[in-house]
Each structure stands twice: as structure tokens, then as C-alpha cells.
Image (cartoon, rainbow, N blue to C red):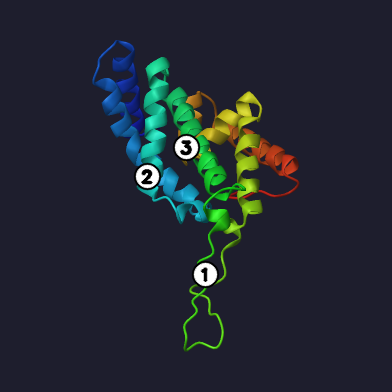
Amino acid sequence: MIDSATVRLQRCLDRLKEGEAGARDELLQAAAQRFEGLTRRMLRDYRGVKRWEETGDVMQNALVRLWKALETVVPPTARDFYRLATVQIRRELIDLARHYYGPQGAGAHHASNVAATPEASAVSPLYEAADVSLDPSRLSLWAEFHRQAEALGEEEREVFDLIFYPGLPQAEAASLLGTSERTIKRRWQAARLQLHEALGGELPGL
């Protein structure tokens, strides 16, 4: 069964298509909760980015991207909206990782894990060793993961975008796509297998 949030999104999309000026605002408000949960989940694996950007900031940036996208295209269905919203989140996080952990990024040159005092005979760490997600190579893997997700076949990518990013249950994804849960399961497994092969066995977040 499609949940009430999806029903609200569809109603907003219908009104936006009819030219109602306030529909876009309501559409983004209805999507904000979904965006926030998704952003929090993804930033847990982008710890190097989260150090510099709060979840609310990333969500706001993604919503601005979505607002601009809706100026030029109106997704006809909630299914299409979820995919459009997913793209905005994915690209926002990739851009942040590149910004902060690229060769000239602030994170790549930030060294604050030490505390030296006149009384101390040695330099001591302020906090435990960084998680592997702080490693630029790990962030590079995440960026490649998202690029490969975009390169999946149409059917696999659509299922992947509904399940991995907004976290829709397989039953709801099946309802949105007008197919069976068995088909969703098969496409989800196929998507993960393709990503596993494309990334040489590395599957962050799966």
C-alpha cells in the first residue's frame, strides 16, 4: 500500500502540473521529512563531510537543487518525483565530498587531531583515530558508488533509487512501479550484484 506521504506528493504534483503557484512550496515541505531521514542516513557514511556540514544544511542545499529542477520539469507521478529527489541528494553529497576532500579541500588539509601543551612531553590525540570514511580514498569509493548507481540499467536503477535512497519498503516500491514484490526483489538483487562487480567487491552502505 502506498503511504500517506506518497499520496500527498502525488496531489501536490497534480496541482503543480495545473499551474498552482503554491504547490511547489507544499511539495518541498512534504518531501522535507523524507529528505532529512535520507540525508542523516547517508551522512553517517560521509563522516568526513558531516564534520563540516550539518544535516540541515545539506538537506537545504538539496531542496534548493530540487526547487530549481522543478522550475523546468514537473514529475508526473510520485514515482518520478522520488527519483528526481534522489538525484539531488546524491549529487549534493558527491559535490560536498569533492569540495572538502579533493586536493585543495579544507578537510584534506585540516590537521586538528593533536593537542600539545607545555606540560605534555608528547603530542596527544584529541579524539580517536578517524573512521575510514574520513579517508579521501573512501570518499572516492563512495563517489564512484553513486556514479555506478546512476549507470545501472533502467529497471535496476529505478528500484535501487527507491529502496536505497529514500528507504521505501519493497512492498511500497512494488506498488509505485506497478509490479510484484518478487520482481522488485529480483531487480534489487541484480542492482547490488552489478554494483559489486563494478566496484571490485566494495559495496559501501549495502
| Sequence-wise first label, 2 or 1 | 2
Say which residue appears at 62% left-offset and 57% top-offset.
135
Closest to the observer, 148 or 96: 96
Q: Which mark is residue 89?
A: 3
The Cα–Cα distance between marks 2 and 1, rounded to whole angstroms, is: 24 Å
Q: Are the residues flagged by discs 2 and 1 in contact, CB closer than 8 Å?
A: no
Say which residue appears at 57% left-offset and 50% top-offset.
101
Closest to the observer, 4 or 164: 164
Residue hosting label 2: 57
Residue hosting label 1: 113
Quadrant housing residue 5: top left
Residue 2 in view in this figure: no
| Sequence-wise first label, 3 or 1 | 3
Badge 3 amino acid: Ile
SS class of the residue under badge 3?
helix
Provide residue 33's location: percent of width, then percent of height.
33, 41
SS class of the residue under badge 1?
loop
Say which residue appears at 53% left-offset and 34% top-offset.
161
Residue 45 as seen in the image, left or right of residue 4:
right
Badge 1 amino acid: Asn
In the picture, which quadrant includes the N terminus? top left
Of tags 3 and 2, the one toward the viewer is: 2
Q: Are the residues flagged by discs 3 and 1 in contact, CB closer than 8 Å?
A: no
Above or below residue 79? Residue 73 is above
Provide residue 136's location: percent of width, then percent of height.
62, 53
Crowd around label 2: few <14 · some 14–19 · many ≥20 (10 Å): few
Badge 2 amino acid: Asp
The Cα–Cα distance between marks 3 and 2, rounded to whole angstroms, is: 12 Å
